[in-house]
Image: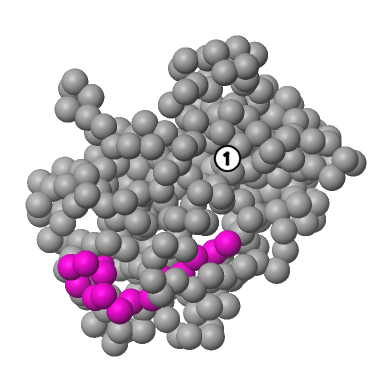
Amino acid sequence: MFIQDIDLKLKDWAFSQRKNLPYELKLELTKKRIEDWYSHWSGDVYISFSGGLDSTVLLHLIRKHLYSDIPAVFADTGLEYPELKQFVKTFDDVTILRPQKSFRQVIKEYGYPVVSKETAAKVRKLRNGNLGERYRNYLLNGDERGSIGKLAEKWKILLDAPFETSEKCCDVMKKKPFKEYHKKTNRVPYVGITQDESFERRRKYEKTGCNVYDSNVPKSQPMGFWTKQDVLRYAAENNIDICSVYGEIKQSSSGELYTTGVQRTGCMFCAFGCHMEGCPNRFQKMQITHPQLHEYCFKSWESGGLGMAEVLDYINVPYLAEVDAINGQGARYQQFKIV
């Protein structure tokens, strides 16, 4: 355990050193990693392009400064903001992939994406997995190594929920189409993942670094040590067009950059992390900006919707905007209106 703690601290230290490099050095290191990846695979590469801020910056960085002919690939899952889909179509050489199943089919077969991928996976295994007694006890209570890896007490309520919980959505709707694209073309991706994404992604980056060569899923994440401020700075300094859902890039009185619109553009109906958001959260904003999609999301399953009202009610997350905002009187919601 002592050796593991030292190893973890060393990785944290190394990551911290890279994360805190001057912006100009980060930019040069990222370009070097992009070139290394391109050279290693003899140009058989592509850019995983979601239309989001990070991948838009990555696309610009690669095509503008290094390789203008690298194709971009977009997975149209049906869960993206409509504005994102239109934004993606404004770029040249973009291949559009589509999953074999809809989100409604996926949640019917596996369950809803709730809390986080880690928590959802544990709940799914405990509810439906053929687990050995030792592993089950570990997921529920931890073991001699401590409580790392156990299901948090707060989320044990999901074990008795009237709906299934699962992390499988991303595997089916995003990873599988990209795997099929790789088999068909033999190309490997650049991915616009940054250190602000999640704790899990940061840990994975600490283990592998930017370019993951020795893996079943090779990938380059050359911006893996960038912060959100780095991404916004690059976009602002290079005058990059970003999707309208983000609004504009502004600077606060303290010098921090921010976007006036939505802060994340992941799958619209995904509930991962929504319990950590203040009001108005992503679903409350959706009611203002995309009322028809909001209605579909929270309409009952029997009525042809996704039935997510029951899910968010169960974990005590609000999903309806305030009445005055719905009537157009809520000034603090105006920034979320899409033009």
Nearest the camera: 313 or 244? 244
**In the image, which residues are magenta?**
62-76
Quarter of the picture containing the N terminus is top left
Residue 197 lies left or right of residue 60; in this view the side is: right
At 12% from the left and 61% from the top, the residue drawn is: 28
Q: Is residue 219 above or below residue 316?
A: below
**Residue lying at 23% horizontally and 24% vertically, measured from the top left:** 252
Amino acid residing under circle 1:
Phe
Picture quadrant where residue 271 is located: top right
Q: Give above or below for 215 relative to 131.
A: below
Which of the 4 quarters of the picture holds residue 198?
A: top left
Q: Is residue 286 above or below residue 34?
A: above
Q: Which residue is mark 1?
A: 272
> Picture coordinates of residue 107 (x, y %)?
75, 50
Question: Can residue 232 be seen here?
Answer: yes
144 in the magenta segment: no
Q: Residue at x 19, y 72 (%)?
A: 66
Give the quadrant of residue 322. Answer: top right
Q: Nearer the viewer, residue 133 or 268?
A: 268
Where residue 48 appears, x then y in whole percent? 42, 66
Percent x, y for residue 142?
A: 58, 38
